Amino acid sequence: MTYTITELAKLADVSPRTLRYYHQIKLLTPYKFNTSGYRIYTDNQIDRLQQIMFYKVLGFRLNEIKEIIDHSDFNELTALKHHLTKLKDEKCRVEKLIETVKKTIQSKEGAYVMKEKEKFEGFKDNLIKENDIRYGDEIIEKYGKKRVEDSNQKIKKMSKYQYDQVQKQ
């Protein structure tokens, strides 16, 4: 099936201007231009736009996305599995934050006595996520995946005070 820029924009819930910009930076090139000069997109471009949008949701910048999906060893199925893992991690992180907020509300209402350590549980995963976004592949390449995972587990076990002390060092 083929789509004009307007049709694809509606389908993906993005603006036609966004699609023109993606074309301009060679992130999403139309399949062809019709005789009237309209951009035409096919299933391949739709799949690519979906990948772009997944990476954007995960916090990647457009130039990073282009580099990833244009790389010679890019595999769409592997990328989708990676997206699923990251989104599940994000869901877990948000659920922990929700639980922390609920416990805090209960504590403020006097229905629950919240331990100091519990007050910061949801934020640890956020820190790990930010570090992963900022340093992900670089730090894994430098120290190895096992060492990074071990470090993340240590962070999860730290109290707020312990974490602050590590930050000061």
Image: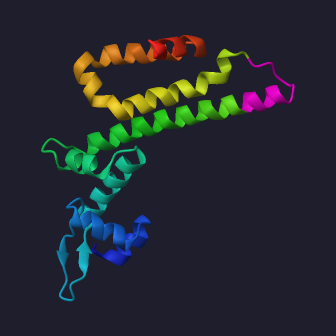
**Which image quadrant for residue 13?**
bottom left
Q: Position of residue 157 (x, y in %)?
A: 53, 12
Instruction: Please give the name of the residue rendered at 20% of the width and 47% of the height, measured from the top-left corner.
Output: 67
Residue 52 sits above or below residue 5 on the image: above
Q: Where's the C terminus, which quadrant?
A: top left
Instruction: Please give the name of the residue rendered at 39% of the width and 13% of the height, measured from the top-left corner.
Output: 150
Q: Nearer the viewer, residue 150 or 34?
A: 150
Q: Position of residue 52 (x, y in %)?
A: 32, 54
Instruction: Please give the name of the residue rendered at 29% of the width and 42% of the height, measured from the top-left corner.
Output: 79
Residue situated furthest bottom in the rendering:
36
**Which image quadrant for residue 120?**
top right
Q: Position of residue 82 (x, y in %)?
A: 34, 37
Residue 33 sits above or below residue 67 on the image: below
Within the magenta stretch, is there residue 157? no
Q: Position of residue 104 (x, y in %)?
A: 74, 28
Q: Nearer the viewer, residue 157 or 83?
A: 157
**Which image quadrant for residue 164?**
top right
Instruction: Please give the name of the residue rendered at 23% of the width and 45% of the height, measured from the top-left corner.
Output: 68
Whether residue 23 sits left or right of residue 10 in the image: it is: left
Whether residue 104 sits left or right of residue 142 in the image: it is: right
Within the magenta stretch, is there residue 106? yes
**Is the image coloured rainbow, by chain, by secondary structure, or in one colour?**
rainbow
Q: What span is in magenta?
A: 102-114
Whether residue 127 sits left or right of residue 47 in the image: it is: right
